[in-house]
Image (spheres, helix red, strand yellow):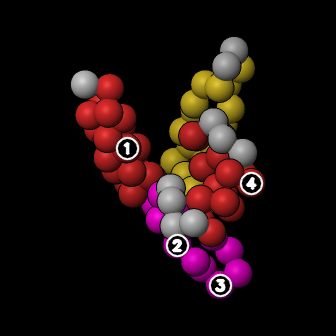
């Protein structure tokens, strides 16, 4: 099942495709506005959203990514307060 999700990065739109609720590394990088190398570094240090290994490929659950964003934004708010 293909669910196109349009996100805006800066002044241009980037189109990402969510397939069965999963994102590729490239799509997640666009979604989070970070580089693919940042995602690799996060995987290596067990930071960031939890990856799903499918054969030699890596996918990320959009629900898990959104939950990770929420958890980390709450931590940021606690540090500021």
Q: Residue at x 68, y 51 (%)?
A: 38
Q: Earlier in the sequence, mark 1 or mark 4?
A: 4
For numbered disc 2, what is the local secondary structure?
strand
Give the camera-side residue of 14 and 78.
78
Q: Which residues are magenta?
A: 49-61
Label 4: few (<14), some or many (≥20) within 10 Å?
few
> Residue 32 sits in which quadrant?
top right
For numbered disc 1, what is the local secondary structure?
helix
- Mark sitting on residue 37: 4
Which is closer to the viewer, label 1 or label 2? 1
Query: Is 55 included in the stretch rendered in magenta?
Result: yes
Relative image position of residue 42 (x, y in whole percent): 59, 59
Which residue was labeled with disc 1? 72
- Mark sitting on residue 55: 3
- Mark sitting on residue 28: none
Label 3: few (<14), some or many (≥20) within 10 Å?
few
Magenta residues, dominant SS class:
strand
Q: Are marks 3 and 2 in contact (CB under 8 Å)?
A: no
CA distance for labels 4 and 3? 20 Å
Which residue was labeled with disc 2? 52
Residue 10 shows up from this direction: yes
């Amino acid at each position: 099942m293909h669910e196109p999700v349009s996100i805006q990065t800066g002044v241009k739109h980037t189109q990402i495709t969510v397939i069965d609720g999963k994102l590729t590394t490239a799509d997640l990088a666009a979604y989070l506005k970070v580089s693919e190398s940042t995602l690799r570094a996060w995987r290596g240090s067990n930071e960031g959203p939890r990856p799903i290994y499918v054969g030699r490929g890596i996918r990320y659950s959009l629900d898990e990514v959104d939950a990770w964003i929420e958890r980390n934004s709450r931590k940021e708010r606690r540090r500021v307060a």
